[in-house]
Amino acid sequence: MTSNTTLLRWGLYGILILFALFYLLPLFVMLTTSLKSLEEIRTGSLLALPRAITFQPWLEAWSTACAGTQCEGLRPFFWNSVLMAVPAVMISTVVGALNGYVFAQWRFPGANLFFAAILFGCFIPFQVVLMPMARMLGLMGLAGTIPGLIFVHVIYGIGFTTLFFRNYYVTIPQELVRAAKVDGAGFFRIFWSIFLPISLPIITVSVIWQFTQIWNDFLFGVSFSGPGSQPVTVALNNIVNSTTGVKAYNVDMAAAIIAALPTLLVYVVAGKYFIRGLTAGSVKG
Amino acid sequence: MPILEIDHLQKSYGETHILHDINISIDEGDFLVLVGPSGCGKSTLLNCIAGLEPITGGTIRIGGRDVTGVSPKDRDIAMVFQSYALYPTMSVARNITFGMQVRGVDKATQDRKLAEVSRQLQIEQLLQRKPGQLSGGQRQRVAMGRALVRDPKLFLFDEPLSNLDAKLRVSMRTEIKKLHQDLNASIVYVTHDQIEAMTLATKIVVMKGGVIQQIGSPAEIYNRPANMFVADFMGSPAMNLIPARVRAEDGQTRIEIDRDGDAPLVITDPVSRNLPAEIVLGVRPEDIHEATGNAHLPGTAQDAGGDVMIEIVEPAGADTFAVTHLGGKPVTARLRAETEVRPRQKFPLAFDLSKVSYFSPQDGQRLN
């Protein structure tokens, strides 16, 4: 290796490190601010490390901060989000898997049109469906409830999950289904015994994608939730906005990190499958 | 009673006709090979027999029972696929027993059949592996094992050897033939390889463009092809198809073939009568001999020929192929290895007239 390429390599690393720092800086500020007392925030510099670490803001954010008139912290809303996101992710993934299986392996007349319509669903802006969806939820008696939110997120997510699973299953040779048919297996048996066991990478993709979307969603949450069913994103917004007197930056930062923690965790745990799943099938057409 | 009867089968996708009026009947123990170039509809026909593709018209009977609208699992068939289609997450043992499991066969019977078949195919040591850990030949065996445990009325093979390398293909071919003899199984086998068709079949169906060109034993197909397509498709090197003129002289049929840079070659066929003025003479390379002048070669009673200019000589070990030009077409003769033949020199060749085929140049149909 010549000294020239070594130089280039170091230059490349230098630029990469610079960008990484740039992206990590906000997280650093959030983390350090959440561990400082209000007194220290007022007097110290934004980028300085905390002189005396305190977990008080985290406790406040979790259990006593006021969101509007309700002063119970993020905790009840956090559980609302869990109760909303977990079933919505599971249902949309299962439905997407079945849809994808049908589109890829059980072609029926008009399948292409159907698939195009479902794809189109991925591109409809959230704002467009707000009014009709509100009316629908009202008619179904689900307005302002967690099941209502689950319903909205499942409907909105099916387009994406169907796309994921369809593109994954389309790479699996049709002869596999034919062999199973000759062996006597039916629609669900083939899905259960042959397709599901090879689906881990794409299930991971679907779960990460759906969980991130649903957990981070604000618009549907603020539009379709009632007082007892607000998700954590809406509560975070309320906590930050409902200050009395002094603005508690440390509590706000702690609350923001708490609200973001689950999606971060999901990615750390399953991230390597996410990349694998996204690229799966792209090698062999 | 025929084990498989296909009666006026039609298959079309909308306006596109894939299969035209297919009629086939085979008996128990027959090895039927469907052969033809890609796109001739042979695989579609096999899928129709399996029930994996719905048919547009006609009937299919397996073992005397009308199965036209019956689903694949109830047709009493087993199928081996081109890609083997092994279930990737299941072990070899589970791959083989999956069908029995689905059909609710009891565990003891499953184990007994698995042991039987794995011994027969010599895959006992592979039973716990996954398909991904097997070589091509081993996967092929597992795929056959999956079909064998079914013990069906009819086996269907869809180009099972086309993914194997040349050497393995030949040895698996022999094994399939042996299996057929041992089990006296009834088999329908699809291939585009005419040598595979010749070696395996008791009965061959040659197809082209969704139409059956000829049905017959390998010998019939080889020796008396029904038309020029079959003549050209079956056999390697292919049958020589030489344009020729016919005239009657002294009550005998004289056949005139153009020669490069020489007067036309005239041969006399004492047997054939009533040929049209223009014909295509079909003669297999091995039915062209060195003309020796005396009659000690087999079939020389009807040998007729003359000197031709040899263009290329290809020694192939056991045989030597000599290529000349007759009637404007290259003509290959398969000569004995020790024959003294040189390129760009004249050489006496003779056709074995007891083996030649005559075709109509207009529609390609056989005339004699």
Image (cartoon, rainbow, N blue to C red):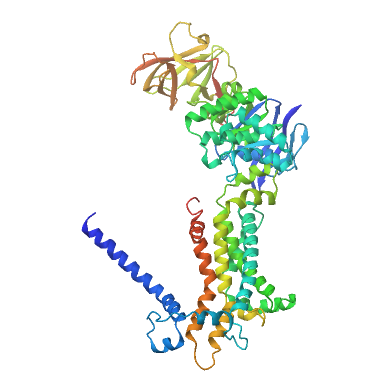
In the image: residue B327, left or right of residue B342: right
Which residue appears farthest toward the left when viewing the image? Answer: A3
Q: Residue at x 49, y 87 (%)?
A: A248
Q: Residue at x 52, y 94 (%)?
A: A245
Picture layout, residue A207 above or below residue B111 = below
Q: Position of residue B9 (x, y in %)?
A: 70, 38
Picture layout, residue A219 above or below residue A162 = below
| A253, A49: nearer the viewer | A49
| A61, B302: nearer the viewer | A61
Which residue appears farthest toward the bottom when viewing the image? Answer: A245
Picture layout, residue A243 above or below residue B226 = below
**Quadrant housing residue A241:** bottom right
Q: Is residue B198 visible?
A: no
Q: Is residue A105 visible?
A: yes
Q: Position of residue B293 (x, y in %)?
A: 44, 7
Which residue appears farthest toward the right when viewing the image? Answer: B65
Location of the N terminus of chain A (image quadrant): bottom left
In the image: residue B164, left or right of residue A150: left
Q: Position of residue A140 (x, y in %)?
A: 74, 75
| A96, B278: nearer the viewer | A96
